[in-house]
Amino acid sequence: MIVKDRLFLLEQSDSFFRSAQTLPDSHGACRIIICLGEFLRFSASGRETELHCRQFQIIPPDEACTITQPVPQRANFLYLSLEPGFWDICAFRGPHTLYAAAKLPAAESCLEDRELENILALASKITSEYQMESQSYYAFRYSWISEILMDIYKNISPACPGPEENSVIPEIIRFLENSFTQKISIDMLSAKFFVSKYHLMRQFKKETGCTIHHFILNKRINHACSLMLRQVPPSEACYLSGFTDYSLFFKSFTKITGFSPSQYPSGLHSQTG
């Protein structure tokens, strides 16, 4: 099944490929391919690559990617193509780190089991919501893709080392996921988790690929979307989601969703993906 959105393409395949088959692409897109089977062979700009289960490869823009899996082996993989405009609305830090990772050996880019499970669950959610043309798809699709990128980003090494031993960041993420509607500041997190705020900001961005501010903002906007889908007025959804200023809520909401709060969710019906 292929999900074709205006800013990304997501494909999960478990099929036989007849000879060489080039994966879909567009100018300037950054691509990620994850092996889900025993192995996967493909060619990018003439370079033959073989991935094994849980390994992934970043493919730079404008490099043709062709599956060269030998018959009768199935080509079992997840493929994500991200348009340049995606980074303008994504909480993720941007494509430059992914481009740098394209030069790394495939063996150095491998997902943990739990991370692959989370990515596949998100991909399945995106696909099923896309097929149903649900309001949830149009509300959360970019957030779900951002979550996939965060799991991938943590495993880009050595350009971006994963969590340090005894890192406090996973604990902070759990706290933020349960407390994002409350008033949160860097100083508060620093005091609560006994870590320098400057080290906290650097380490959080290194391990997740986004800033603490963008992480919280993304959670609050998603929550506001959920509330408004249940007919909660925007003025109430704003404050129930943790915002203290409606003008900031309006600006952030419009940038991330493409709709003003007053247009949402009625404007979703006019979307075609």
Image (cartoon, helix red, strand yellow):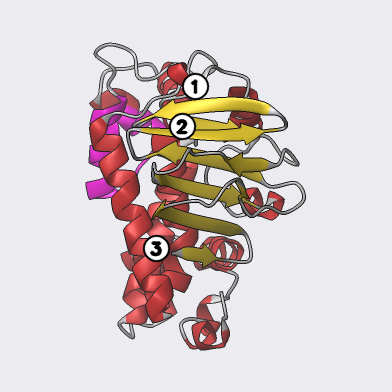
Looking at the image, which residue is at 46% across and 25% down? 201
Which image quarter holds the N terminus?
A: bottom left
4 in relation to 131, above or below: above
First reached walking from the N terminus: tag 1 or tag 2: 2
Q: The residue tagged with tag 1: helix, strand or loop?
A: helix
Residue 267 or 109: which is nearer the viewer?
A: 109
Residue under numbered circle 1: 106
First reached walking from the N terminus: tag 2 or tag 3: 2
**Disc 1, disc 2: CB below 8 Å?**
yes
Residue under numbered circle 2: 56
Amino acid type indicated by mark 2: Phe
Mark 2 or mark 3, which is nearer to you?
2
**Disc 2, disc 3: CB below 8 Å?**
no
First reached walking from the N terminus: tag 1 or tag 3: 1
Badge 2: few (under 14), some or many (20 or more) residues near its Cα, within 10 Å? many
Residue 184 or 200: which is nearer the viewer?
A: 200
Rendering quarter of residue 163 = top left
Question: Which dot marks residue 126?
Answer: 3
144 in relation to 207, above or below: below
Looking at the image, which residue is at 48% across and 56% down? 11
Mark 1 or mark 3, which is nearer to you?
1
